[in-house]
Amino acid sequence: MTKNKKLFATVMVMSLTAFAMTGCQMVSSSSDANKKTSQTAIAEQKPVLKKDRKSIKIGYSQFTLGAPYFVAIVEAAKKTAEEMGVQFVSIDGQDNINKQLSDVDDLLAKNIDVLIMDPKDPIAQVPATKAATKAGVPVIIVDSSIDPSADFVTTIQSNNLANGELVGEWLAKQMKNKKIKMALLSGAQGNPVGKERRQGVIRGLTETQINMSGGSSFEIVAQGWGNWGNEGGLKAMEDILTAHPDVNVLVTENDSMALGAMKAIQAAGKKNDILIVAAADGQKEALELIKSGDYGVTGMNNPALIGKTAVETAVKMLEEGGQFPKTTYTPPVAITKENVAKYYDPNAKF
């Protein structure tokens, strides 16, 4: 966990922070957020024509299977490939940068036709995309983001900024005039997805407070790093509560860290004192807690939809070629107690 910093939010600071985004299209309001998809860069992909789909081989490099979310993406991709009649091979990078680089080499050696990759690090995995291009293999990035210097046709992910903004709006309306003393749990330092998610929440919170009262005020008392996982969230929240027992709002960058943090909150006897908010995911366990009122809101980041869309895009790319937006977003949604029944699936993998 980084050294705790006390930051007082002002309208000027939050506005500047919200616009300090790179690599994605900004969202000006929740109504705009529901309409936006990135069309700022279009990639042209020449088709690699196949005699039949049975000859198409898709390679998938997942940087980790250490959380249910990542397992769900791969399983959805595999299921879609089977339904479409194409070959599918995936490798688990085991949360190791160097192993993922080696995994891509292994996939290329298997003569794959397209590479789908969820990169662990936006910079470190750039050479993997270059190697794929050299081998004549187009690259699709999923879930995470990668440095613009990488070679890739398109990125398929949830709209992290827009999801965060919708969650921030909900938080502002829920807290109304109450003083907010916020703890922030982030995934991994330098991760662009986490940055988009937290900045989306801050933007939505700030803009909605301004619209409601003509000003914005909240305090971020600490930021912890939970490495996207349950155990990481637990440990980070334990440390935060020790230093800042007066926290009344927890904002996390995914559900898994929030679920871990809940254990620390319950152990400290603060279950009724801290409102739990996640910028993204929609994990089944979190939705169950939203239904019961023990968890405030989460942004929809459907791994099954991302995995399915990635394979469909790969097949289209190989059979038809054509133009693809540099980023393809799934629809942003803030899942609350009012609409959770629409999104909850007791049989979901995630």
Image (tube, rainbow, N blue to C red):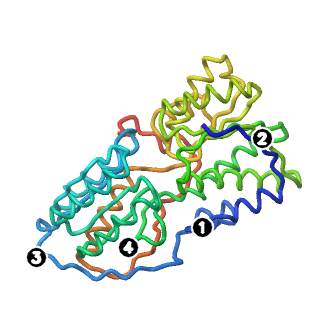
Which residue in the structure is indicated by mark 4? 153
Q: Label 1: few (<14), some or many (≥20) within 10 Å?
A: few
What numbered label is drawn on residue 306?
none
The residue nearer to you, when weighing 116 against 313, is: 116
Which residue is disc 2 drawn over? 6
Callout in the foreground (4, 3): 4
Indicate which disc, 1 or 4, sits on the residue closer to the N terminus: 1
Secondary structure beneath dot 2 equals loop
Please report whichever mark, 4 or 2, sits nearer to the chain's N-terminal start.
Answer: 2
Determine the secondary structure under disc 1.
loop
Frontmost residue, 112 versus 272: 112
Residue at the spot 54% in from the left edge and 37% down from the top edge = 226
Residue at figure coordinates x 45%, y 80% from the top left:
42
Q: Nearer the viewer, mark 3 or mark 1?
A: 1
Determine the secondary structure under disc 3: loop
Q: Amino acid at mark 2?
A: Lys
Helix, strand or loop at label 4? It is: loop
Between the C-alphas of marks 1 and 2, the distance is 25 Å
